[in-house]
Amino acid sequence: MKLMDLFVKMKGDLNEIEAELERAITSDHTLMTETSVHLLKAGGKRFRPIVVLLSGKFGHYRLDVMKNVAVPLELIHMASLVHDDVIDDAETRRGQLTVKSKWDNRIAMYTGDYIHGKALTVATKLDNPRIHQILSKAMVEMCIGEMEQVRDFFNTEQSVRQYLLRIRRKTALLIAISCQLGALAAETEERHANRLYRFGYNVGMAFQIRDDVLDLCGTEKQIGKPPGSDIRQGNITLPVLLALQETAIRPKLLQEIDRIQQTDGAGDTAEAIRLIRSSNGIKQAEALADRYTQKALSALEGLPDLAAKKSLKDIARFVNKRNY
């Protein structure tokens, strides 16, 4: 299954979400609107809105309600990307110039803050206090995850456990609450909302691990940025940590990582990538992503046999095997 197949099935609702996203970030401030729309038009999988809508199918589905969950969650994700690009000094994302590259770091940081504010403005249309509590807590956790990533730049002594906790905060949690809040907004049974949260969490973990593998194995055309961007920025991901556990590779790889750090990320990463690819790190990372995917699929057992359940299963399998 390709994600595009789901877009076709849900075209009408997703078009409305896309239009609502643009309405949400449009204001009288020309520059702020221009920078925000630049990010929006760069595209994206709209993964979080999709799982929000599908999770809502297990309750009383109303698009006018669901969009007030889907739009804030996607805006929060977008804001985190703008901030990430500043921290990572990234020139491109999805094959397009980043906001910090087209304008500057200051404009990019305020654009991210602006989008965050717009996300909360849309969310105020929801009258369920629990949704707001879950959303605000997740935003705090995401910030902690981002800070931990900065703290651990070029830290080759970090544990796999540290990495997993970081991606839980940075990535998995937002996907988990996208499923949970979609269900709660549709007044789905609590037990079903809990299952959907577990599904989203495990899919989110697999999503990030797969993303980290793609950074080392994908092409620039596939991933929309130069391969090896993570290691160039000092982000030591799971395949790298696992490769460092191999005694035959560790000394040379440490030397390459140190060289990249000494050049402030401007050095060539080709040799580091070659070493990682020659290890078992990528295969082991993919195996862990497989396990998270299986946990995600197991979480769906017990949900009503709706078309949305099959779509969520398809999404889990897509995430684990995607090449973009």
Image (cartoon, rainbow, N blue to C red):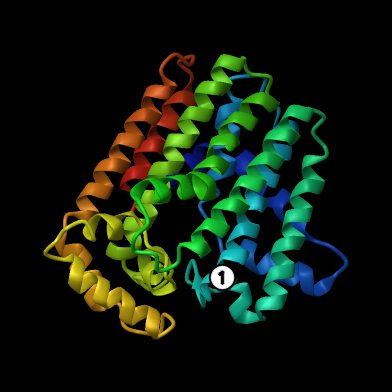
128, 157: nearer the viewer: 157
Q: Residue at x 66, y 25 (%)?
A: 184
Residue 318 visible in the shown view: yes
Residue 16 visible in the shown view: no
Q: Is residue 59 left or right of residue 32?
A: left
Q: Identify the amino acid type marked 1.
A: Ile
Q: Residue 90, how many percent across, how many down?
A: 51, 74
Q: Residue at x 57, y 59 (%)?
A: 147
Question: Quick one: label 1, few (<14), some, or many (20+) residues within 10 Å?
Answer: some
Q: Which residue is mark 1?
A: 87
- Image quadrant in which you'd find residue 17: top right
276, 308: nearer the viewer: 276
Q: Residue at x 56, y 70 (%)?
A: 87
Q: Determine whether 25 is above or below 322 in the image.
A: below
Q: How many marks?
A: 1
Q: Determine whether 175 is above or below 112 in the image.
A: above
Q: Is residue 47 left or right of residue 137?
A: left
Specify the quadrant that holds the N terminus: top left
Q: Residue at x 79, y 33 (%)?
A: 126
Q: Residue 255, how many percent across, how many down?
A: 25, 76
Q: Residue 88, how many percent across, how many down?
A: 51, 71
- Image quadrant in which you'd find residue 258: bottom left
Q: Is residue 49 left or right of residue 297?
A: right
As helix, strand or loop, the secondary structure at mark 1 comes to helix
